[in-house]
Image (cartoon, rainbow, N blue to C red):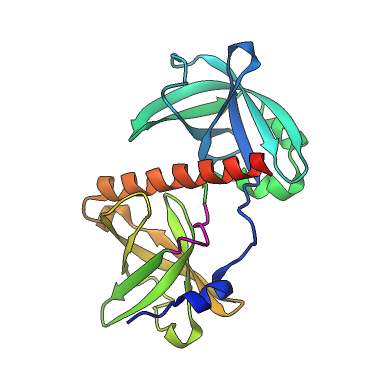
Amino acid sequence: MKLFKKDSRKQYRTKAKDFSPLQFNLVLPGRELLPGAIFNTSMNGAAIAFEPQRLPNLALNERVRLQLTMTQSKKIIMVDATLKHLKNANDNVICRFQFADPSSLAKNLDISLMSYFNRREAYRVKPDINEPIEVDVEWNGGSTQGRVIDISLTGMGLGVKPELTEIPSYPEPVTLSFRLPVSEKTVMIVGNTVHPRPSGKIILYGIKYDWGQTENSYQQESVITSYVICRQREIIGRIKED
């Protein structure tokens, strides 16, 4: 049953343009900037993915400089940081940095961005409006279909039409099945619903993944990782073109 036809896409569009509220770049020798894709942030540090072809050889505990750009105000903050961990993830290297002076960062951040740093928060991206992601949702005794509003490595915002909102609002496990544009494989994740609320013409459900109950969780996480990086780079590229 196809619940989301092309003529109904507009009601799921939250913004006319792709938007990234902040951007981290690694400052390379010669002041060249290497754009990164954000995985999570807190006032103490951030995990950022870079293309390995351009990333210099960094040693653990090496001091680096990051450039933080706040998209809306165009304000730039230079952040001194220390590399604490790195790992390969598909065609990217994810670096976890610890900020040298969190208090200085807090003083210079736009107030509207404080929520991104108040706790270690996984960075969410919105799907391309021309590539909507439909999700089959199943639970004990029921099933329905929704559409991804935003997605991260820890959860997603799921939009469901009001007439199809029989999804349990209490923490009963649900199984999500969907495909992301970066892979032909179907992602299947167990999660729990949190904070259902009306949002325009849909009911918006927060879904928190339960990786411990998800089979082949590493493979599922890998696909989402690739998608989050890909979308951030697409969005950053379009912002620069504008």
* Residue nearest the viewer, comparing 4 with 135: 4
**Residue 230 sits in which quadrant?**
top left
* Residue nearest the viewer, comparing 187 with 171: 187
The number of discs equals: 0
Q: Is residue 185 magenta?
A: no
Pinpoint residue 165: horizontal percent, then vertical percent. 44, 82
* Residue nearest the viewer, comparing 151 with 182: 182
Residue that sits furthest to the bottom in the current view: 163
Pinpoint residue 209: horizontal percent, then vertical percent. 37, 58
Pinpoint residue 26: horizontal percent, then vertical percent. 57, 24
227 left or right of 202 in image: left
Residue that sits furthest to the top in the current view: 30
* Residue nearest the viewer, comparing 230 with 217: 230
Pinpoint residue 179: horizontal percent, then vertical percent. 33, 59
216 left or right of 61 in image: left
- On screen, 118 above or below 135? above
- On screen, 182 above or below 2? above
x 33%, y 48%: residue? 223
x 61%, y 45%: residue? 238
Q: Magenta part mainly helix, strand or loop?
A: loop
- On screen, 39 above or below 1? above
52 left or right of 7 in image: left
x 36%, y 49%: residue? 182
Q: Which quarter of the image is occupied by the N terminus?
A: bottom left
Q: Which quarter of the image is occupied by the C terminus?
A: top right
Q: Which residues are magenta?
A: 125-132
